[in-house]
Amino acid sequence: MSARAGIVVTGTEVLTGRVTDRNGPWLAERLRELGVDIAHNIVVGDRPADLMDALSWLASAGMDLIITSGGLGPTEDDLTAAVVGEFQGRESSLDVELEGRIWAILERLMARWPDLDQDAIRRSNEKQAMVPEGATVLEPVGTAPGLVVPPAAGTSGPTIVVLPGPPRELQPMWSVAVETEPFRAAIAGAVEYRQDMLRLFGIPESEIANTMLKAREAGIDLDALEITTCLRRGEVEVVTRFEPPQQPVYDAFAALIADRHPRELFSTDGASVDQQVAELLTSSRRTIATAESCTGGLLAGRLTDLAGSSAYVLGGLVVYSNEAKTALAGVSPDLIAQHGAVSNEVAEALAVGAVKALGASVGVGITGIAGPGGGTDDKPVGTVCFSVATEAGPQITRRLLLPGSRFDIRDRSTTVAMHLIRRTLVGDAA
């Protein structure tokens, strides 16, 4: 069995949801890359007893390595280093040289605020320089040092890596931590893990569950693989982790999915639809523009984000009102009156209008009812019409009924639009 690790994210702000945890998932992926089996990810508040309980539970569960993030600042609630030292049975004392290095960093920062109480800051500085006996110090990236703390001599248990909470400090410090001798010793049992992702669109998770049953019936040993499925933004992600000897098993499983779902399987290498659209636009030297009603520019923003630049995203028209649809995208008032603002016909006119208004190669029109309220029996909340057009005119048009809240409908709409763009560009490439 591979070395096993647990993560403890500290901070009441994370526990209560005021701050979204970015460290746990990031650390989990780094551990996977090292061949370490990530077993648990725990979030605790700024209470020493709760942190101690989390460490005790992970140790009792047989973890070889525990990683903590957060709780290394100068304030009274930052107690991770002291708790970890106590848990490992190692007495903490002031590292005078470390204190001096931290103080040098603080002096540069204090130059911006000359009226600060230097004595108070110095006392806080001392707190951050308290180091458990036998611990390896990880030099500060900000002002807080990290630690690698092995169990006390003559005892067994996990090595604990103590990292700061801000990702900009934690991530560069991680690369130093993994090279320390206690860290390498703790993960001596690491193995190689491979991980592959298949992405499908236009299919429910239940159908993937049925496909897995068919795989077992076909004699594919799925128990040799660790398979997780996730429905996100209307896409199904099938992520499989396995050790190298199981590569033939995974290949057979992936081939069966491709055979059963050839239209829905759009990515066999984990590439997102955003990445694929970016590559298709770049390789074909095409430009794109949007005219959006219910999504209010979210698709244009998503296209710009994936590009990293505005090289091929010319812009987006936000056209909530009928007057805006006419004035900005050139939609005929008669067309709106005849078919309604939420209709395939208006979506097509918006897509063509985006091409003409901004001189784009590809235009996308979206109009719908995201709610709350405003729906009818014929067009309930969640009705969204999409169209993708090129210089030759409309290429793909769809009307869908999307479930969920206003946020869900708007977010899901951008994913549907991305897939329609992809299909248009792939068809043109073919």
Image (cartoon, rainbow, N blue to C red):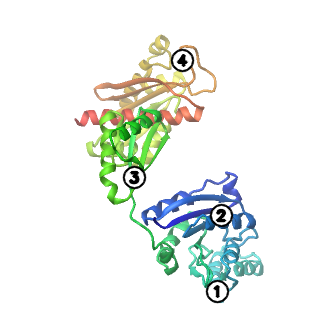
Distance of label 4 from label 3 (alpha carbons):
47 Å
User: Residue 287's x, y, as percent?
Assistant: 33, 39
Three-letter amino acid code at the position of disc 2 = Trp
Q: Secondary structure at mark 4?
A: loop
Q: Nearer the viewer, mark 3 or mark 2?
A: 3
User: Residue 324's x, y, as percent?
Assistant: 51, 26
Q: Residue at x 30, y 40 (%)?
A: 286
Q: Residue at x 40, y 31 (%)?
A: 364
Residue identified by numbered label 2: 57
Disc number placed over residue 224 in the picture, else none = 3
Q: With respect to residue 264, does 89 lie above or below? A: below
Q: From the viewer's perspective, tell me whether residue 358 is left or right of residue 284.
A: right
Three-letter amino acid code at the position of disc 3 = Ala
Q: Residue furthest bottom?
A: 96
Distance of label 1 from label 4 (alpha carbons):
68 Å
Residue identified by numbered label 1: 100
